[in-house]
Structures are given as C-alpha cells and as structure tokens.
Amino acid sequence: MEQIAFLTQLISISESKNSVLFVFDIDSTLYNVSPRNIEIIKDYAQSNAQNLTPALQSTLMSVTHHYTDWGIKTPLLRLNLLNPDMELLKSIKKHWNQFFFSGKFLHHDEEYPGAVNFVNQLSKHAPTFYLTGRDVQRMGNETLEQLSQSGFPTDPYHNKLILKPNKEMLDHEYKLEELKKLALDFDAIYFFENEPIILNEVVTHFSEDKVIPICIASTHSGRAEINPKIKIIQPDYRLKEDL
C-alpha cells in the first residue's frame, strides 16, 4: 500500500504543479525485457541447429526467464551450460547483441503491471517523456510502434520519445546530457530508471528538487550500488483502482 500511496501522490503532483515533467526509461523500467532475451536464445538454437547436438538444442529451447534476469547469462546458468563451455556463451552473446538491439523481438517484451495506466494518468496533466538507451537507427521506429501498440501515450510533443542518436554513446553520459537540457525548461523532473549508474549520476549533478530520481527495482547491470538517497519502488505501477 505504501507504493500505491507514492504513485498516487505523483499523480496528484501532475495535477497540481506547473512546469513538472515525468521521464521514463523503457527497458526494465516500463517493460520486462527478459522474455525478449529468452526468445533470442531460442532463435539461436533454431538457426544454429546444424552446429548443435540434438540434446544441446533441446536444452537451449527449454530456457526460461525471470523478471530479475540481466541479459542472457543468468538464464543460461540455470541450464548448467556455461561451465566449462564459455565458447557457447560467446556464440550466443554474439547472436544476442545482433538482435536485442533491434526491433525484431520487441513484441516479446511485457509491460510491467499497471505501467500503461499509470503513464496515461500522468500524461493527462503533465508531459511524460521517454528517455531510452535504444538508438534511433536500429530501434527508433520499432520503439514508437511498440509504445503505441501497448497503449502508452505517444504524442510527439507531450510524450516525446528521446533515443540515442549514436549507438556508441554511453547510456549514463547520454541520459545525463539529455536531462540537463530538459532541466532548462521544467522546474521539476521525476525520472524513472532501473540502472543505478545512471541514477547515481543524477544525484551528483542535480539538486534534489530539480531532478528527482526513482529507482525501479527490476534488474540492472550490477556495476554500481544504488545511492541510499534514491527512492526505490517495485516494477509494479498498479494503482488502487487496478487491484
């Protein structure tokens, strides 16, 4: 109930305050991308059948996902395939790199509970933007289509989609620069993100009432611990009326 109260408070803020912006990351913030990872592994098993034993292919096809999985290593570990055969991991990782950062498997992503309704509720009263590490060239059109098909608001001005112009850019540097630009136009920004490295940068570079970071406790790279000053919520946006 504490989380519902917090989310309800944010909707009240959107209704009552001028010049407030809500910004959402996409992967592992609005969508559970673990099913996408699993389907890419299965696609590898099917497209490389000639190089795999029937038993190994069958094992790969049995892979399952959990919403806390980061990438493909954890689900593959559950299959007991990575030790000692690291060459297999390298081969699957190459396949994953090719297709995770593309539009081909986006339809396997799952919206977190209540996410669509919550973003729409905010968008009734305040701009709600999407700030994602996906890049324009490989995932731009597909991302907009995905958001629209899910039911997220996609007005190009009120619900602006911000993508990396260059895939080589580091996510934390790119997002920080984009937030700096947005901070020139809004009094307060509420920023939803799952990656501690990015959230910690926000705490370092902005006053606590200018950009308010909110950590989605789904999954992350493990490269940093979350700053204790940052509010943490579960990947469940359901409001009282959704229960």
Image: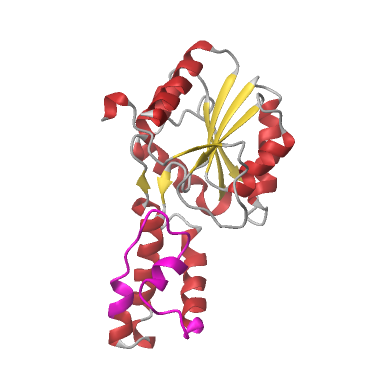
Residue at (48, 48) in percent of width and height: 27
Q: Quadrant of residue 55?
A: bottom left
Residue at (66, 29) in percent of width and height: 182
In the rendered image of this protein, does residue 64 appear above or below residue 209? below
Give the extent of the magenta segment: 58-87
By secondary structure, the bulk of the magenta-drawn segment is best described as loop
- The quarter of the rendered structure image containing the C terminus is top left
User: How far across and how far down the image is residue 238, in percent?
Assistant: 34, 32
Left or right: residue 176 versus residue 140 is right
Residue 69 belongs to magenta span: yes
Residue at (64, 29) in percent of width and height: 211
User: How far across and how far down the image is residue 8, in percent?
Assistant: 41, 22
Residue at (46, 69) in percent of width and height: 73
User: How far across and how far down the image is residue 242, in percent?
Assistant: 28, 29
Instruction: Please name whichever residue, 125 or 48, is drawn nearer the observer in this view of the structure.
Output: 125
In the rendered image of this protein, does residue 51 appear above or below residue 217? below
- The quarter of the rendered structure image containing the N terminus is top left
Furthest residue to the right? 205
In the rendered image of this protein, does residue 140 appear above or below residue 223? above
Q: How many marks?
A: 0
Q: Quadrant of residue 35?
A: bottom left
User: How far across and how far down the image is residue 68, in percent?
Assistant: 42, 55
